[in-house]
């Protein structure tokens, strides 16, 4: 069922709109500075709405400043005392969340709803399996059916009073119960749903549970806003929720990262590089796909669809724009250069030019004209103006390129079962190491293919020394 559209401050949700991400601060709400700082970090991590606990009057007193200075709408989370909800709404809360299991019944729920209606704020009826209204728990037990019945009863009370700017949540700590409860409610109501697995657990388990539950529901068209609950900082929750939505195609914009798991070929500290790149690009809101790969063997190829990328080497790395090499730099210059390149890429794209500046891009401070990646000692350009090291038959490195050049007649694998011709930097070296041909035969092959200074048209004397 398509849900109706409601509003939380400046954020609209429901009606098939992309679900906004929510998280909840873990600071002392009475400490407005600390709470605002954390809200700012959450917003940077992708949170669209932030919930703040209001457990007492000191927290309610700080709410005014928090609500007015927050970059995103702030919801007050209230248990037991409906007067705290009213106080938070008076202070400027964009919404409140109450639990029908402990707010004190229909009359008190309506007091909060009336205040919301008066101030144009949003209400969430947050049903939790662990704190169900007694009536429904006694009748149906701790079940998804009881959660659904409780949410439906509160929704009916609010709608009878003509209040519609509210949403519900039906959360359990188990994936199956959460999914079943949300599906049951979606069958009978068009009230928007806030999704989440409550008390999902530590980071890995919590993200796994949330991804499964949110994936099952959102891919079936259920869910209008989400939270990933983790025993972790709220910034992590927001980031995880954004990535789940992105994986479902429900979140556009911001930087999407492609990064490899690393393996024995990786010679740089990839996790540290990725963390630095993410920190540097945290403010980017425009869509951008960035690849951070451990090596040049598979990195550039597997990250071809990325807008920009970096692939590690031995304490160095290569930068790419849309799969095309643009520069090679020492490890400590990679993240700043990638940031510089990303900002240029975005500016160029915004201006309608060639993103990344095409082949002309060089990181700031690098001497112009030096072609990164050119092997030391080789001339920058050949006789026809083409970089000689590029024109040479033997690639600088890279099994992928060597694979395409396996000389005819040479077996694909060496004596130990390993493709010997792939392991070396050039076919001649591989041939020698493989033991399949002798030194002179390898040179003969080089000469035929014009490698290592041999001329393809030079007369070949078997057993001779064509390269010197
Ligand atoms: S990109 Fe390179 S380092 Fe990363 S997993 Fe693939 S082969 Fe290994």
Image (cartoon, helix red, strand yellow):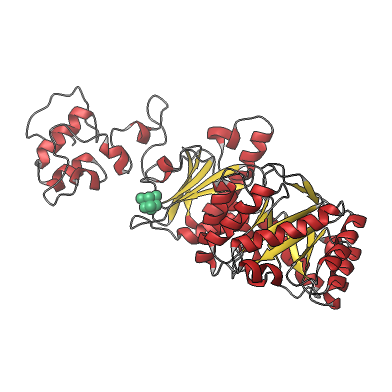
| Image side of residue 376 versus residue 18, left or right | left
Residue 51 seen in the figure? yes
The N terminus lies in quadrant:
top right
Residue sitting at the far front? 139
**What is the x, y in percent for residue 89?**
87, 63
Relative depth, front residue between 446 and 385: 446
Relative depth, front residue between 107 and 351: 107
| Image side of residue 442 versus residue 179, left or right | left
**What is the x, y in percent for residue 368?**
54, 40
**65 in relation to 2, above or below:** below
Q: Quadrant of residue 129?
A: bottom right
Residue 72 seen in the figure? no
Q: Identify the residue at image location x=62%, y=42%.
A: 287
**What is the x, y in percent for residue 68?**
86, 61
Residue sitting at the far left? 463
Relative depth, front residue between 220 and 312: 220
Residue sitting at the far top? 457
Q: Quadrant of residue 34?
A: bottom right
Counting the numbered discs, the total is 0
Q: Identify the residue at image location x=68%, y=35%.
A: 350
**332 in relation to 131, above or below:** above
**What is the x, y in percent for residue 169?**
68, 59
Relative depth, front residue between 353 and 129: 129
Q: Identify the residue at image location x=82%, y=51%.
A: 164
The C terminus lies in quadrant:
top left
């Amino acid at each position: 069922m398509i849900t109706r559209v409601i509003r939380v401050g400046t954020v609209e949700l429901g009606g098939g709109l992309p679900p906004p991400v929510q998280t909840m601060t873990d600071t002392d709400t009475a400490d407005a500075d600390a709470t605002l700082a954390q809200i700012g970090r959450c917003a940077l991590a992708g949170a669209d709405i932030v919930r703040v606990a209001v457990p007492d009057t000191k927290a309610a007193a700080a709410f005014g400043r928090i609500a007015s200075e927050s970059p995103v709408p702030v919801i007050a989370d209230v248990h037991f005392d409906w007067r705290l909800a009213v106080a938070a709404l008076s202070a400027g809360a964009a919404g409140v969340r109450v639990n029908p299991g402990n707010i004190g019944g229909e009359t008190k729920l309506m007091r909060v709803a009336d205040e919301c209606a008066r101030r144009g704020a949003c209400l969430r009826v947050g049903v939790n399996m662990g704190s169900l209204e007694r009536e429904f728990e006694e009748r149906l037990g701790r079940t998804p059916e009881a959660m659904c019945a409780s949410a439906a009863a509160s929704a009916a009370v609010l709608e009878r009073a003509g209040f519609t700017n509210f949403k519900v949540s039906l959360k359990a700590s188990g994936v199956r119960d959460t999914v079943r409860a949300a599906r049951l409610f979606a069958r009978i109501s068009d009230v928007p749903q806030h999704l989440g697995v409550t008390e999902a657990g530590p980071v890995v388990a919590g993200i796994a549970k949330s991804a499964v539950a949110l994936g099952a529901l959102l891919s079936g068209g259920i869910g209008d806003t989400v939270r990933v609950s983790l025993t972790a900082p709220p910034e992590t929750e927001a980031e995880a929720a954004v990535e789940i939505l992105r994986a479902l195609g429900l979140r556009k914009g911001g930087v999407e990262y492609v990064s490899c798991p690393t393996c024995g070929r990786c010679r740089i500290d990839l996790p540290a590089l990725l963390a630095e790149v993410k920190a540097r690009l945290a403010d980017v809101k425009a869509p951008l796909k960035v690849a951070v790969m451990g090596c040049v063997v598979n990195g550039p190829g597997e990250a071809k669809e990325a807008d920009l990328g970096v692939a590690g080497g031995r304490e160095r790395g290569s930068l790419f724009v849309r799969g095309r090499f643009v520069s090679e730099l020492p490890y400590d210059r990679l993240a700043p250069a990638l940031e510089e390149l990303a900002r240029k890429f975005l500016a160029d794209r915004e201006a309608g030019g060639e993103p990344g500046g095409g082949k002309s891009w060089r990181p700031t401070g690098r001497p112009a004209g030096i072609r990164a990646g050119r092997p030391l000692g080789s001339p920058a350009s050949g006789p026809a103006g083409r970089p000689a090291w590029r024109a040479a038959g033997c690639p600088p490195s890279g099994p992928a390129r060597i694979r395409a050049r396996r000389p005819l007649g040479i077996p694909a694998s060496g004596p130990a079962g390993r493709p010997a011709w792939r392991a070396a930097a050039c076919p001649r070296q591989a041939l020698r190491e493989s033991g399949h041909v002798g030194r002179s035969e390898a040179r003969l092959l080089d000469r035929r293919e014009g490698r290592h200074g041999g001329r393809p048209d030079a007369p070949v004397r078997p057993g001779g020394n064509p390269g010197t």
